[in-house]
Image (cartoon, coloured by chain):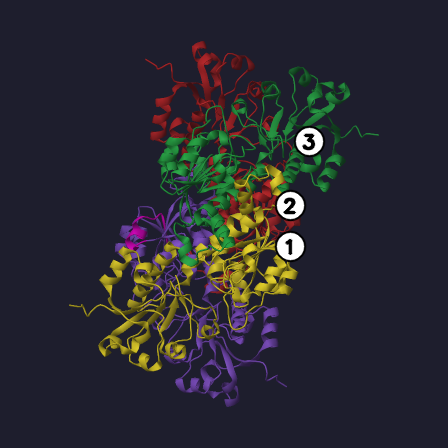
Chain colours: A green, B yellow, C red, D purple
Amino acid sequence: MTDTTKPLVISAPEPRTLDLIFTPESLGRLKANYRIVEADPENIAGLDEAILSETRYILGQPPLSAETLARMPALRCILNVESNLINNMPYEVLFSRGIHVVTTGQVFAEPVAELGLALALNLARDVIDADLDFREGRERWGGEGNAGARLVSGSDIGIIGFGDLGRALNRVLSGFRARIRVFDPWMPPSILREAGVEPAPLETVLSESDFVFVVAAVTSENKGFLGAEAFARMRKGAAFILLSRADVVDFDALIAAVESGRIVAASDVYPQEPLAADHPVRRLKGFIRSAHRAGALDSAFKKMGEMVLEDMDLMDRGLPPMRCKRAERETVSRMRSRPVSVN
Amino acid sequence: MTDTTKPLVISAPEPRTLDLIFTPESLGRLKANYRIVEADPENIAGLDEAILSETRYILGQPPLSAETLARMPALRCILNVESNLINNMPYEVLFSRGIHVVTTGQVFAEPVAELGLALALNLARDVIDADLDFREGRERWGGEGNAGARLVSGSDIGIIGFGDLGRALNRVLSGFRARIRVFDPWMPPSILREAGVEPAPLETVLSESDFVFVVAAVTSENKGFLGAEAFARMRKGAAFILLSRADVVDFDALIAAVESGRIVAASDVYPQEPLAADHPVRRLKGFIRSAHRAGALDSAFKKMGEMVLEDMDLMDRGLPPMRCKRAERETVSRMRSRPVSVN
Amino acid sequence: MTDTTKPLVISAPEPRTLDLIFTPESLGRLKANYRIVEADPENIAGLDEAILSETRYILGQPPLSAETLARMPALRCILNVESNLINNMPYEVLFSRGIHVVTTGQVFAEPVAELGLALALNLARDVIDADLDFREGRERWGGEGNAGARLVSGSDIGIIGFGDLGRALNRVLSGFRARIRVFDPWMPPSILREAGVEPAPLETVLSESDFVFVVAAVTSENKGFLGAEAFARMRKGAAFILLSRADVVDFDALIAAVESGRIVAASDVYPQEPLAADHPVRRLKGFIRSAHRAGALDSAFKKMGEMVLEDMDLMDRGLPPMRCKRAERETVSRMRSRPVSVN
Amino acid sequence: MTDTTKPLVISAPEPRTLDLIFTPESLGRLKANYRIVEADPENIAGLDEAILSETRYILGQPPLSAETLARMPALRCILNVESNLINNMPYEVLFSRGIHVVTTGQVFAEPVAELGLALALNLARDVIDADLDFREGRERWGGEGNAGARLVSGSDIGIIGFGDLGRALNRVLSGFRARIRVFDPWMPPSILREAGVEPAPLETVLSESDFVFVVAAVTSENKGFLGAEAFARMRKGAAFILLSRADVVDFDALIAAVESGRIVAASDVYPQEPLAADHPVRRLKGFIRSAHRAGALDSAFKKMGEMVLEDMDLMDRGLPPMRCKRAERETVSRMRSRPVSVN
């Protein structure tokens, strides 16, 4: 028999699963504290009135109509564990009712930042080709193998976008005594200064950096904003590391800039994923490839469950969620990152 | 005509050269402030009495006999820019006369630490093979490519040796919120604690770490002290990153431990350098190879010149050198790192 | 003639004034970018329809009825520069319309944290009475004057409340290698851990600290929650530093605990302000008095203007405010801090 | 019966005592590991040959002649726990024999730095007179009490001298986002930069700082180097905090500068200690007095014992001392700080 005093949660976390985002221990706590109704995300409307009327939380991002929402008077929060907001529910209705929509994408910040730093260090020190050469017996020893090598320590670094990813990058870079400039038009300059970085226009970030990290989300306004002109501004030999979404970049222009030898680059994201077998990026010199695997660590997924539990606990006590990131009325409809279909 | 009021420096920096270790600007300052006598390191004794009697500094590590030193009453310091101390001069004589012997090896600390972190991140995220697979069209996307991937952030880290390299590693790791244990029997525990790390016995460092960095110098006492037993203590899947000298490790045992799949590893140093074309490490899975190139960056060599100038300036003013590292009477004869023959 | 293309701002910042919260340069920018209508806060409803209908921002916290708000269709944000939220407007209406209510109290965090640290250091080292004794010729020299003296470095510190003040305290304490425990039931534990502090129950914070800083806001639930029982839990000789509001403390119990010699204390806030001339706290030994002056620095007020301009700039561009703190639907009605009448 | 296999230590720590500098637990370790011979510091020469011939360490700073030293062939180190080096032994003999002379003054760095910060914060916020006024019923509330108040956060700070005290100050200031300039002619600029501070000439440190901390040791060259000219360079209203020794300052000029209202100041040290009852500094407005009590905390003295034990352990193993500070051949005779006669 179900304990009807426990708050009710509709679970529709696709493409995630409960086992992906909760450790066994966390899943135990979830089940101990909540009634979980596992639902087909395509048919929330088909759930019993008894369920809808008592639902406090939705775990997932199922399509929801205004009518369905009207049947859910107790709803406090939609906890989107896919993390890219899509336009499949009437956000205005949610916001005007004070129902929070939160995402757990922050879990990816640390893994992405670490991979980003790995890519930067690899570009700076040519680690990958040096290992390949060593395998093949062509290695060059000592200083001879270090032509063009340089340090991240003391360098000029640019970060484009200062959300969770940008902050995590700033943190893993904190031991490097670098000068870090940030372009983020959504962020007030004084907040950037408080984080120890310098707010700067995009042009300056591009032209004054040895390493440029791109961690900006795709919006309706910034598609392809980093193109041939941007790469032409960069310092000769500088490194461009793309970590957020391919849509912010003119990828052909990026390839051309690397091919020309002006810059080196690395990317975790691509215009098509998976990528055609004959795509030129596969053989591009001065380029490091990562197959959209920067964030998708098991430990990151497991953190989602922790975040969800912490915020539901706050909301159970009548407090606002603090752990997950809230969708904002002003920007929810500007987001253009495509959701993932595989974890 | 030489300005005999300027202090006299014998220059014998082999295998370095003045152009390697000084920027043009620094070399200008050196020549403006000192009389430089470029000498054959194998024949310091053959220099004119007028030179020997006025020599204040020796730049380099030439062989010196007690007799030659007796002819150099004005000598204040030997600035060894190769940086590995060899037994080619009577150190006791130098120490009892209060002549400093200093080395500039600290310049390598930052480049080595950055490469060390790069190797650790590459092992943790399998960055190199992922790029190679991508080149060949065999890449795995997203979470599927991340089996076994893990974070440095929040991990347990062990550092063996806490000289300049250990400190530089600790600094580049400072944004990673890791728990860092250090084994260094030459270092009082309270100094380690002040540096924010935990002093620990070797066994604990090995058994409780996800990443073990070896940055200990070779001494007469620690040759091969990391062998089969040490690797057996390590956590399954942990990473072993060797950055100082191959002589502290039983290299065959290291290869066996990696081959068995128990641990993964990376190394910048080898029992023979260069290494035989058929050495098994060339094809070893779970191993990243770097050909003794961790420290030898041009920017590091140029810092040597800066250090030398700063310390000579202090000593010119009757002060002790502060910038370079002093050889210690107690340990100078215990050092066993072989000097390099190429830069 | 007014430029009607500029957004309209109703200015009613009492008890602040525009000259208090803006530097001349900032005030110039405000006037260059906005139409400013200075209004009597008690009579917003009496403003012309032409004004109300175009108002984008209200600078201040004037009483507002639902009717008046209905006449303001362009309103995006109420920027409360007094910073204590009072119940003089229908917050539910504002939230359901998506009108932000933001406060600028964060400007006080840094000055309050610095004064808090000054008070802690003064209690730890008896700085004030030592200076007084010295004036009077009764000083004790060296170690004799240090009975009971102790360090903040390496101590156990408790912080009650981890909003802006708690974070600022944590920052100014960052060089002290202290163990910092935090009690804040509104904050998820993982956020505290990410800030480098340990989440802990109130009882532990009280019983395991050498210094307890109280920076919690007053809510409907926590009035007087720190009373005789709390002080009895504290370590003998520990220091209690009250920085937020007197209402969270049973002040008579605090005085009794200090009088008994069990703890020492300092406070910036009092049950009545100003305080009666014969209030016992005036002569209390082991107590440092500050007359609600921890935050009210001119530089802090001037930062309010900067914050307001930064957030209005974001909202002008259709973005959400990021700089000021937003009132939360869930908690706005729980706040019980009395607003100030003097700056 | 004494265990003659244990190393022999002559104990003559005056004005310290073993009970002052060792905790009971540390004293137990000392006695367990060493033979302790408590000696009259004025008569080391009168000790038995059997003792002198076996002495490995001297704990203290007793007068020693060359003859007495010649009778001590096993001597490795003199551990001076008073910490000011005086000219009562032939240092050249010690250095040429490779006998270390070390001091434990570093234990005072943290307490002095904390008091220095307390004094700076008190000057910046007028905490002391505000408390006194409050006691007398003359307090001013809120902003009215804050005329002239300012923050340490974000300020310009100057530090004169960058030994242990300067480093400890830099550490306790690390959460304040201040710009810190340092004048220390004995320190190479690159070491200052690595510590995150800016090397600067004395004139710049004086003229560009809101807070000037003086932590320089007295030497034969710098007596009274901070006089009327120095104070005239300072910013109007800036704070001067003297923490090392009064001899580096022209104290009358300091008093005049404070009396004139140009600067405010605080001092822990005085030209005479104790100070005359009618000394003008006792009544000086804008000045905070501390009676040479910045360092003399019991916890600091107890750390001396720990340092001594750590370094003796290293030397027992044939290693150089790392924990205490070594006297330098070049500078030992330049030191002019008078030793203390009381703890």
Q: Please give the residue where the numbered disc 2 appears in the rendered image.
A: C200
Residue B261: numbered disc? 1
- Badge 1, how many Cα within 10 Å: few under 14, some, many 20+? few
Amino acid residing under circle 1: Gly
Disc assigned to residue A316 = 3
Residue at far front of view = B278
Mark 1 residue element:
loop
As helix, strand or loop, the secondary structure at mark 2 comes to loop
Residue C237 on image: x %, y %: 59, 54
Q: In which quarter of the image is residue C297?
A: top left
Q: Is A44 displayed left or right of B91 in the figure? A: right
Return the chain for callout 3: A
Task: Write the start and end of the magenta stretch as one range.
Answer: D200-212
- What residue is rendered at 50% in x and 53% in y? A136
Nearest to the observer: residue C100 or residue D243 = C100
- Are labels 1 and 2 assigned to the same chain? no
